[in-house]
């Protein structure tokens, strides 16, 4: 583990006054609502203890992944990791890759950095910010080897569909951040959203489905079952995985 994650020595930065709230820029339509969810004492303490190691700020601008991680490795970016357990499992299962998670829900960020810190996971960094802002301002063009978005908020009422994060403009933004031949992976348990994802991807022309003629694939081995997915399964929901490659 790198020297900067020294759990036993007192922090040189005074993070105790850190305001724990997500970073985002003003915009007309957001894909999320900031939930009031209470943080546990452990999640709060995690910000004092581990944020200086794992946290990246939207307002620090474009990153150089090799500098952030201190090595050159394939980069995976996940948007909306929720409580973070599946992202942490992936980072541990693929130590040869570096992972950047982006999430606006502070308790989820706290849980992820707490568990990552305790387990001394070194190939992970986190933005507590709006993913659209982070992709625009922080992730360099053609830098990402795999982009993943699992069970984004479905916004199931028709009048709210404009808040769905997967739209043509979002896909173009993601496309610009992907390396040639990079993978893009979406999953949802909402059939109507799966169809919308497939339509947007098919219209983009710059992606080919790993499912051949079908937009859908079986869940790839690298994707663990997520917390939100488990909840959907209990309610009898189906699951659609879309795995595309940038051409
Ligand atoms: C339905 S949850 C799914 C969480 C997790 N992927 C899972 O499967 O358990 C969607 C998550 O996306 C986050 N989210 C939505 N829009 C976002 C955005 N623009 N930037 C960052 N996170 C976002 C929400 O805060 C929420 O935690």
Image (cartoon, rainbow, N blue to C red):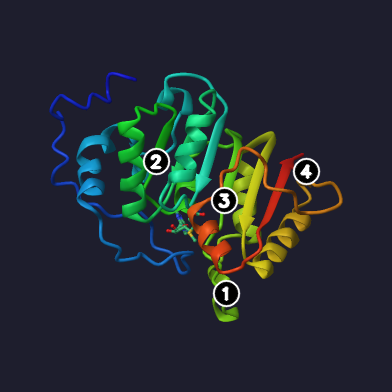
Q: Secondary structure at mark 1?
A: loop
Mark 2 / mark 4, whichever is N-terminal: 2
Q: How far from the left and from the top, in percent, is residue 35?
A: 34, 65
**In the image, which disc is placed on residue 209?**
none
Q: Is residue 138 visible?
A: no
Cα–Cα span, label 2 and label 4: 28 Å
Q: How far from the left and from the top, in percent, is residue 13?
A: 16, 33
Cα–Cα span, label 3 and label 2: 15 Å
Quick one: 224 or 152, which is closer to the camera? Answer: 224
Cα–Cα span, label 1 and label 3: 17 Å
| Residue 62 lies in quadrant | top left
The 10 Å Cα crowd at callout 1, few under 14, some 14 to 19, many 20 or more, is: few
User: Which residue is rendered at x = 77% and y = 58% of the image?
Assistant: 203
Q: Secondary structure at mark 2?
A: strand
Mark 3 / mark 2, whichever is N-terminal: 2
**In the image, which disc is placed on residue 210?**
4
For mark 2, what is the residue? 126
Cα–Cα span, label 1 and label 4: 27 Å
For mark 1, what is the residue? 156
Mark 4 / mark 3, whichever is N-terminal: 3
Mark 2 or 1: in front is 1
**In the image, which disc is placed on residue 149?**
3
Quick one: 127 or 204, which is closer to the camera? Answer: 127
């Amino acid at each position: 583990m790198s020297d900067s994650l020294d759990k036993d020595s007192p922090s040189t930065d005074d993070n105790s006054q850190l305001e724990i709230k997500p970073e985002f820029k003003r915009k007309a339509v957001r894909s999320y609502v900031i939930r009031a969810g209470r943080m546990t004492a452990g999640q709060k303490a995690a910000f004092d203890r581990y944020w200086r190691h794992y946290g990246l700020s939207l307002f620090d601008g474009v990153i150089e992944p090799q500098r952030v991680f201190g090595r050159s490795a394939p980069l995976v970016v996940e948007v909306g990791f929720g409580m973070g357990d599946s992202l942490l499992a992936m980072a541990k299962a693929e130590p040869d890759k570096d992972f950047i998670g982006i999430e606006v829900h502070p308790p989820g960020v706290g849980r992820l950095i707490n568990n990552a810190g305790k387990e001394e996971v070194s190939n992970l960094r986190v933005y507590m910010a709006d993913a659209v802002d982070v992709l625009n301002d922080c992730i360099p063009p053609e830098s990402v080897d795999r982009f993943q978005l699992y069970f984004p908020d479905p916004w199931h009422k028709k009048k709210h569909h404009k808040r769905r994060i997967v739209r043509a403009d979002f896909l173009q933004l993601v496309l610009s951040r992907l390396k040639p031949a990079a993978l893009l992976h979406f999953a949802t348990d909402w059939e109507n959203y799966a169809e919308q994802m497939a339509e947007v991807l098919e219209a983009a022309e710059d992606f080919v489905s790993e499912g051949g003629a079908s937009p859908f694939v079986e869940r790839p081995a690298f994707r663990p079952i997520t917390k939100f997915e488990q909840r959907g399964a209990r309610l009898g929901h189906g699951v659609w995985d879309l795995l595309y490659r940038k051409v």
